[in-house]
Every structure is written in C-alpha cells, then in structure tokens.
Image (cartoon, rainbow, N blue to C red):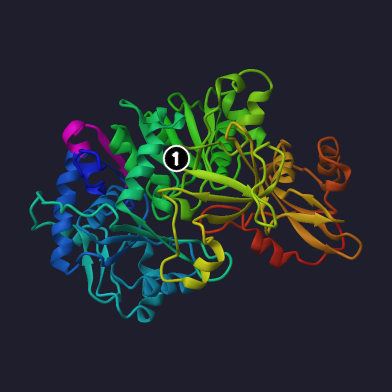
Amino acid sequence: MRGLMMDRQLSIASILTYAATRHGEVEIVSRTVEGPIHRYTYADAARRTAKLAHALQALGAGPGNRVATLAWNTFRHFELYYAISGMGAVAHTINPRLHASQIAFIINHADDRFVFLDTTFVPLLESIAAQTPRVKAFVLMCEESALPPTSLPNALSYEALMAPHSSEFAWPDLDENTASSLCYTSGTTGDPKGVLYTHRSTVLHAFSSCMSETGRPFENNRALMPIVPMFHVNAWGLPYCAPMSGAKLVLPGALHDAEPLYDLLENECVTTAGAVPVIWQRLLTYLETTGKPLRSLTALRVGGSAAPAALIEAYERRGIEVVHGWGMTETSPVCTNGSIKGEHRAGAERLNYQLKAGRCMFGVDMKIVGEDGQTLPEDGASQGELLVRGPWVASAYYNDPAATAAFFTADGWFRTGDVATLDADGYLTIFDRSKDLIKSGGEWISSIDLENVAVGHPGVEEAAAIAIPDAEWAERPMLVVVRKAGSALDAAELNAYLAERVAKWWLPDEIRFIADMPHTATGKISKKTLRERYAQPATAAGI
C-alpha cells in the first residue's frame, strides 16, 4: 500500500527560493576578487540568479550540459551554484590548484561546454585552451569594463551577459534524481575521478548537516563562513546550509591569509567557520603573535585531516569549540559530525572524544571490514577499512567503470581506503589512509598519531610522518617538520619530546626541517610529494 502524501521533488533551486521568501533580508557578504567587500541579501541573490539562468539559456546551455566554474568563494560563484543546477544543467566546480594537465583532462572528460572563471585564472585557462576544443565560451566573472586582455576564445563578461535578462525565472520541476553538480577527486593516485551529485543527494546532505548537533551554528542570526573552497566538494555543503537555515553567509574570496580572514571573522561577526587544519593553525599563529581576540566565533569546523590536540586546546582556551567532521568527495562530503554525547563532554575524556572524527550522521551507514572483507565489531578497537553507504554517497564514478569496480562493492558500499575503528556510540576514529600507514617490523605505526604528537611541541608549525625503506625493519618513520617562526627547534630536542609521548619504536629514524610543507590541491599535506623527495634515507637527521 502506498501512502497518500504529495510527491514533491527535492531541488536545489527551492533552497534559494525559500531563503529569498522567508529571510530575504539576511546578508551574503563576500570579498571580491577585485578587492572590495560586496554586500547584498538572499532576495537580491535570487533575482540575480534568475537573470543568470536566462543568460545560460541564451548562451545555449541546456538540461544535462556541464557548465564549469574555476572560481573563489564569492557571491558570483554562489549565483552559479543555484542558476546552473536550478535550470537543469550540471555545475562542474573545478579545483584550480590542480596541475594544468589535470584541469584539461577534467574539462574534456566532463565534456564541459562553458567555463566560468575568475580573472585570476585567465593565464591558467589560456595555457590549456587549445587542449579543450569543445568549450564554446569562456565567461570571465567581472564587469565588462574589467575584462583583461585575453587570448581565450569567445571571452565574455559575466555582468554584461546577465544585464539584459529578467530577474524572474520559472525554475523547472526537475526529477530530484537529476544530476546537479560534478566534482572530481584530487587525483593523488591516477587521473581524477568524477563524482556526479543529484538534487536529492545535495538537499538531503544539507538537511542532515543543518539538523545535526554541529548544525546549531546555522540557526537564525548566526553568521557562517566557508573558508573551505567552493571549488571542491561544494564547500562541504555550506552554501546550501546557510540559506536553508537563514544564516548570514560570509565568503572570503581569494584571500586565505590569516590577516584578511581575521578581519572578515571579526568585522562580520562570524559565529562558525569551516576550513582544513592548516588554515586554523595559521590563524592561531596570527592571534598569538598579534594578541588579537576573536569575539564572535564560537565554533570552528575542521575537515580534510584531523586537528591535533594542541590546536583544539588552544582554541578552546579562547572559548571556541573545535568540531571535527569526516567525509570525502564521494560522500558529498560530510558523513560524521563532531557532536559529543553528554556523558563525554565533561572531564579529561572530552578531549579524547573531540580528537575523533565525529559520530555517524543519520542517513549514513558505516562499517569496518578486515582484509577478508568480513565486518568487524564496533568496539572502538578493531581496525579495518571503512566502508560507507547512504543517500548522499556516490554509487559509481562518472564515466569510469574501472575505478568504479575498484572502489564500489557489488552489494552497494563505497570503499574509502581509510583505516579506522567504530565504537558502539558511533564515534569514528581514523588511524590513517591505508597507503600512509608505516609498517615497521610487522607492526603498524599511525602517521596521523605521530604527527599530532609532534605538532603539540610549541616550536612545530606542521609535521608529516612518512615511511622510508629500511633493510632490517622494512619501513621506518621519517618526520618532516616546519618550525614555527622564530623557533630554533632541532632534531634532538624534538626526539626527546616525542620519547615522552610515544612508544620507543615509533620514534622517527630521521627528522628533516623544511621551510614550506607541500600541500595537495585540497589543502592536505601532500605525503606523495614528501615520499618522492625523501624515499631514500638521508645521511643525517635534522637537515
């Protein structure tokens, strides 16, 4: 027997329509690529998004066409999120930090017909335009008067393109399983892989994020700032959560240095912001150096990699709660939230639970499996590969059957490649990526745990543990470290610090100090780069 309920489709356009209708006066504030701060409301954004949808149709974009963006976190990128998906096309956000050859591969693999780009990326696109012959036009996200000289074919101005069109648009009643957006993985192993989201998966992901314990900062009269880029995994879904919940949305543009971020956080009274740990570490260093306060920020969201205990404690001393989440491009991305059960919020064990990757959210199933594929107990101790499934988890890679066969099981689970544990309360602990574990003499060393201990030293800005070959033990750990400004830390001092906190056999055989840590296109430490540089043992520690 079927129920007697209305069969209304979930759609991305309805989120902005709701925001414009029910809290149209709430602001979207963004730092522009040109520099000045831009302000308008959700009602204003809805009108401009309608004009943009008409402009897309006039360009020739139709249902299912892929429309690419290479853009920072700005109001124009926000408009593209809703206009492209809302009119039935697919918003393909491209990570501009990828290698140019990877970007050309992605544009061609997705069969993008139009590319919208911030003027920052004109030289990048010019360098590969000849390799992307199916692109019909390049739209520069600026006023016509600000168009830079360019060799890009069919280069147009975003504002001039929109100008003649109506500010009302009849958004189509799309099937909720219609493709809405496309994001490619960072391609650290092989070519990038495409993940094709739907309207249904995106709206359900936003619902779950808003209802979770970490969703409390999205209540009315709160201000949310996604520092995590809109060009990767939809900025963790935050550009959908803010209008859905009525929160003020603050977008940092192209500037991710500590000082301009601090200025926005303070001047716009941001209550919650999301970023990878390296951003929060840089901001903390800025706060410690300048002595400046953070008066409005109450919670910061952390993803991409784990925040070390020292970082969590430093922010908590300032009255700011650090909230972990875990996810991947393939999971839209958020699958856990850092809410802590009441019995775990007090006393010394609080920090232990905050260090975990959060608790499984409603709508997502997780399990840990051993090498034989059998499910392991959720006892917080049994380690294995983490598998996930749910309505906002991919079921396959876009146009990539070989990768699909490798990462998706026949019975409907996605293999994450993360080595983890689950406990009875749903807390997830990530021990490492399977490729980053260090196996020394048959015993596993968690690179994440070793790194987090190292970052606890006051002289360490960043640390990464990698495996180096060893004739006797097969692999031994090397620790690569960036010192904090002004620190004179040496290998002997750091080793002595580690010796008090980790097992003796975990102590790194070598410690190298470097000026800058390599990062991936998504802001994580690039251990692939470090392994390529330091695969062979050095002659002395502390270089």
Label 1: state its secondary structure: helix
Q: Which corner quadrant of the image does residue 295 belong to?
A: top left
Q: Residue furthest right?
A: 472
Q: Nearer the viewer, residue 83 or 388?
A: 388
Asked whether residue 251 is in view, the answer is: no
Q: Could you tell me residue 257's position as x and y percent? A: 49, 45
Q: Residue furthest front?
A: 1
Q: Badge 1: few (under 14), some or many (20 or more) residues near its Cα, within 10 Å? A: some
Q: Which corner quadrant of the image does residue 433 belong to?
A: bottom right
Q: Which residues are magenta?
A: 18-31
Q: Which corner quadrant of the image does residue 497 belong to?
A: top right
Report the side of 321 relative to 486 (left or right). left
Magenta stretch contains residue 30: yes
**In the image, residue 137 above or below residue 357:** below
Report the side of 455 relative to 509 (left or right). left
Magenta stretch contains residue 293: no
Locate the N terminus by quadrant.
Answer: top left
Q: Which residue appears at 74% of the width and 37% of the height?
A: 457
Asked whether residue 367 is in view, the answer is: yes
Q: Could you tell me residue 112's position as x and y percent? A: 31, 70
Q: Name the residue beneath numbered marker 1.
A: 261
Locate the C terminus by quadrant.
Answer: bottom right
Q: Amino acid at mark 1?
A: Leu
Report the side of 342 relative to 65 (left or right). right
Q: Nearer the viewer, residue 499 or 381?
A: 381
Q: Nearer the viewer, residue 332 or 389?
A: 389
Q: What is the total number of numbered labels drawn onto the structure image?
A: 1
Q: Which residue appears at 35% of the width and 48% of the height?
A: 202
Q: Could you tell me residue 96's position as x and y percent? A: 43, 62
Q: Which residue appears at 43% of the width and 54% of the height?
A: 232
Q: Could you tell me residue 455's position as x and y percent? A: 70, 40
